[in-house]
Amino acid sequence: MSATEAASPRTAAETTADSRIAAVTEPQPAPGATLPRTPLIARAAAELVGTAALVAVVVGSGIQATELTQDVGLQLLANSIATVFGLGVLILLLGPVSGAHFNPTVTLAEWWTARRTGAGVTAREAAVYVPAQVIGAIVGAVLADAMFGEPLVQWSTHERSAGNLLLGEVVATAGLILLIFGLARTDQLRFAPVAVASYIGAAYWFTSSTSFANPAVTVGRAFTDTFAGIAPASVPGFVGAQLAGAVVGLALVALIFMRGRDAGTQHGA
């Protein structure tokens, strides 16, 4: 120990204060971003459980609503409110683990953008995420049916194949992708739990399809013949519309959040 250190011993309070300052000033992961070195199995589990919980909320609240009232407007209102709160909580809880995609279009869009930027899921990770989401969605639908005494698996008879409904899915999915990746481009992902949940709640009402906007959820909802169900024959059309919407959403992100050249690049040519 030097003479200076002996003359000026550091107190416990000073050491604690310095530690707190260091914790604040060190770079922190963006809210909602995947934590570094999180094992892939943990991220896959988060996607499976999160998607299962989301579908359980959607299907379960739909069953509950139809048991409480015959008014279709009130049924949709109850269903949308439950989904808003459930989705917000799930993104807040699981976002730091896996990014809280719960949606193959989000995963595939992130993989596509990561091909150039390097920030996002890899092809290998996407190949794990997507099956986890689909399995989770099926589990969530079966769980909701079980909780309400419905047949565990009963194919939905709710046809949703009209062209206007498919257009609604394109719009709903494009808006979702634009929102998520727009938040990322503007460094505002910390608002994702509120923003994404709010958007889905609004899209329940302003889109003709009530905004599935999610291929995994669409597949899961085919397993329940209840308020939130979709006939298996309607699933391919909805999934195709959602994938098309994701492409439109990414194009809008590229256009609206176009990155300008810096001053050095502009004057150096």
Image (spheres, rainbow, N blue to C red):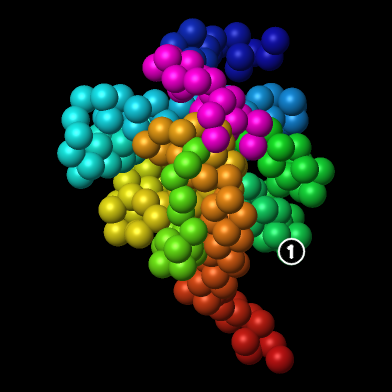
The amino acid sitting under disc 1 is: Arg
Q: Residue at x 60, y 79 (%)?
A: 261
**Left or right: where 120 falls relative to 177:** right
Q: Is residue 211 magenta?
A: no
**Left or right: where 66 falls relative to 230:** left
Camera-side residue: 240 or 94? 240
- As displayed, is residue 254 above or below residue 43? below
**Left or right: where 45 falls relative to 83:** right
- Magenta stretch: dominant secondary structure: helix
Q: Which residues are magenta?
A: 134-155
Q: Position of residue 5 (x, y in %)?
A: 61, 14
For the question of whether residue 268 can be seen, the reply is: yes
- As displayed, is residue 192 above or below residue 149? below
Q: Which residue is mark 1?
A: 116
Q: Residue furthest right?
A: 124
Q: Position of residue 168 (x, y in %)?
A: 42, 62
Q: Residue at x 41, y 67 (%)?
A: 164
Q: Position of residue 155 (x, y in %)?
A: 55, 35
For the question of whether residue 36 can be seen, the reply is: no
Q: Residue at x 63, y 89 (%)?
A: 267
Q: Position of residue 143 (x, y in %)?
A: 51, 20
Q: Is residue 135 magenta?
A: yes
Q: Quadrant of the C terminus?
A: bottom right
**Rendered image quadrant of residue 172:** bottom left
In what element is the residue under mark 1?
helix
**Left or right: where 89 falls relative to 6:** left
**Rendered image quadrant of residue 79:** top left
Camera-side residue: 150 or 30? 150
Camera-side residue: 135 or 105? 135
